[in-house]
Image: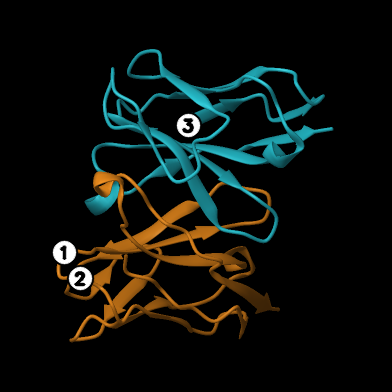
Amino acid sequence: DAKTTQPNSMESNEEEPVHLPCNHSTISGTDYIHWYRQLPSQGPEYVIHGLTSNVNNRMASLAIAEDRKSSTLILHRATLRDAAVYYCILRVGAGSYQLTFGKGTKLSVIP
Amino acid sequence: NAGVTQTPKFQVLKTGQSMTLQCAQDMNHNSMYWYRQDPGMGLRLIYYSASEGTTDKGEVPNGYNVSRLNKREFSLRLESAAPSQTSVYFCASSPRRVENTEAFFGQGTRLTVV
């Protein structure tokens, strides 16, 4: 199964862009790259997902390397509400019904 | 917008007691899931239901049973609770296979087994 590697923690100043990296060197050609985040004491929340091309939505942008061995989640202007644990996930196993969560990156936003 | 609703939000059980965690979604989703999250860890899949009438084991199914009562509801049962089942339990749903769509999660049930 393909694995992901993320930094344990990152800090950002409020209103500045944040780039959250994820390495997935063993990704297969059919694996989608998903990002979820979990605010304190809440359930995970979908952020974005993509396969090969860069993706944008109202929450964030996802930049995928040309060889797909890494990706970066970009929050354009961090707010205090963006302080959360961010999970980079490859769909793994269980007939595409399982999202395998690692420990993620804990993002702190400094006012 | 209710989304995914879990009940109860908190529960304390004694070892050996049984209980059922309830989950309902109002988004007409086909697939539903139960995850558990232990302190400082990511979520692990317990069971999932690809569609109404089907259930399958996930990564950590031992000690649990599930029922997909109808398209809206997916329950998780602990027949004989153990301290190792102390965790936060999350229910989720998705329109179809989670591979290329988003999953929606409930707010969680904090279960303590003493």
Instruction: Give residue A70's quadrant in the image.
Output: bottom left
Residue B38 lies, with reference to residue A31, above or below; the image says: above
Does dot 1 land on a helix, a strand or a loop?
Answer: loop
Other residues around mark 2 within 10 Å, as few (<14) / some (14–19) / many (≥20)? few
Tell me whether circle 3 and circle 2 mark residues in contact (CB < 8 Å): no
The CA span between labels 3 and 2 is 31 Å
* Residue B66: percent from left, percent from top: 46, 23
Q: Residue at label 2?
A: A28
Q: Chain of mark 3?
A: B
- Let me know if residue A57 appears in the view: no
Query: Front-most of B81 and A58?
Result: B81
The image's mark for residue B19 is: none
Q: SS at mark 2? A: loop
Three-letter amino acid code of the residue under disc 2:
Ser
- Tell me the residue at 17%/74% (across/down): A53
Q: Is residue A30 visible?
A: yes
- Residue at the image point whose x is 28% and y is 17% from the top: B53
Q: Which residue is mark 3?
A: B4
- Circles 1, 2 touching at the beta carbon (< 8 Å): yes
The x and y percentages for residue A107 are 60, 74
| Secondary-structure class at tag 3 | strand
Which chain is home to disc 1?
A: A
Q: For mark 3, does the 10 Å Cα neighbourhood hold few (<14), some (14 to 19), or many (20 or more) residues? A: many
Residue B39: image quadrant is: bottom right
Which residue is at a point 24% across and 63% down the rendered structure image? A32
Left or right, residue A82 beside residue A108: left
Asked if badge 1 and badge 3 are on a common chain, one would say no
On screen, A77 above or below A49?
Answer: below
Q: Residues within 10 Å of mark 1 (few under 14, many from 20)?
A: few
